[in-house]
Image (cartoon, grey):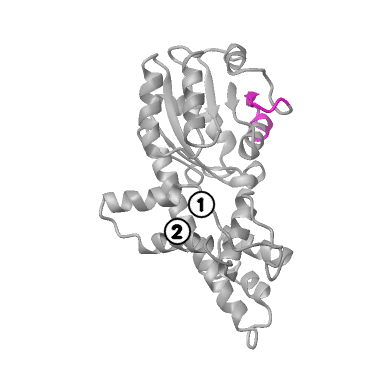
Amino acid sequence: MHIGLVGLGKMGNNMRERLRAHDIEVTGFDRNPDVTDVASIADLAKALPAPRIVWIMVPAGDITTAVVTELAGVLEAGDLIIDGGNSRFTEDFKHSALVGEKGIEYVDAGVSGGIWGLKNGYGLMVGGHKKNIDLAMPIFDALRPDGPREEGFVHAGEIGAGHYAKMVHNGIEYALMQAYAEGYELLDKRDDIIKDVTGTFKAWQRGTVVRSWLLELLVRALEQDPEFEDIEGYVEDSGEGRWTIEEAIANAVPVPTISASIFARFVSRQADGSPAMKAVAALRNQFGGHSVKKAD
């Protein structure tokens, strides 16, 4: 199989490498001439066999819309676009309608795994028609973690379902990170009793009910900087947490824990960051390579 990939940043470049390691031929395009395989999106389309499959891995919003629009001008009926970025699910309805006017197929894919996906594989949540999912299944199988397919991949539903599932996933992620971070601050505060904060978290990695990959990443961050002295407690958000809360309000679903976690991030930007928010910032850097503010 031979596919196109638009966007070769932190995630896209690693995905290209993982796909190639699993015998998927990839022609990539990026505005950065140092990483691109072709000079333009038009050249990308020419390089691919029909029916063409093009995976988009660029920032959500206007950039994704621009790429979808440009692809619609160079692809043909029967070709398939997969949006693997963090687009809001409502954008999938617009994008699928836009390319559908030319008979181009569309799938949305929520992707989790961050900068570790190259080694560990990516958790995938996809939305779209079954025929398109079946066509792209070799790609999904190459990207997902090793092991049973159902433990790293789901065809969540129709168009929009993949990004909707990823949105809720990220809302849960916000809450989990906040809980670990608040626990860190409380342990660190009682240095008269707790003499090994890092060791305490490390001991939770096996056998306890709070063990998780996020916990392992928090231990890794603590081992690198036990007091988070080199990082500010300033935490950005990439949108999905807000969208989750907006959906909860629209559907009268209470999400107090997720809501509190996003509001805590807002607070972190208004004053000196707390130890808990330093932990959240460190976690985001560990799993996603998200930028952090360095302490002066």
The residue at the point 39 percent across, 25 percent down is 96
Is 232 or 239 nearer to us in this picture? 232
Query: How far separated are the C-alphas under marks 1 and 2?
Result: 8 Å
At which x and y percent is residue 73? Answer: 48, 14
Asked if disc 1 and disc 2 are in contact, CB closer than 8 Å, the reply is yes
Left or right of 79, for residue 49: right
At which x and y percent is residue 233? Answer: 60, 63
Number of the label disc, if any, that sits on residue 262? 2
Q: Secondary structure at mark 1?
A: loop
At which x and y percent is residue 239? Answer: 46, 47
Asked whether the viewer can see residue 26, the reply is: no
The residue type indicated by label 2 comes to Ile
Q: Which residue is mark 1?
A: 237
Rendered image quadrant of residue 160: top left
Q: Residue furthest bottom?
A: 192
Quadrant of the rendering where the C terminus is positioned: bottom right
Vertically, is 50 above or below 278?
Answer: above
Vertically, is 121 above or below 231?
Answer: above
Rendered image quadrant of residue 47: top right
Left or right of 160, for residue 284: right
Q: Which residues are magenta?
A: 17-33
Is 99 or 142 nearer to us in this picture? 99
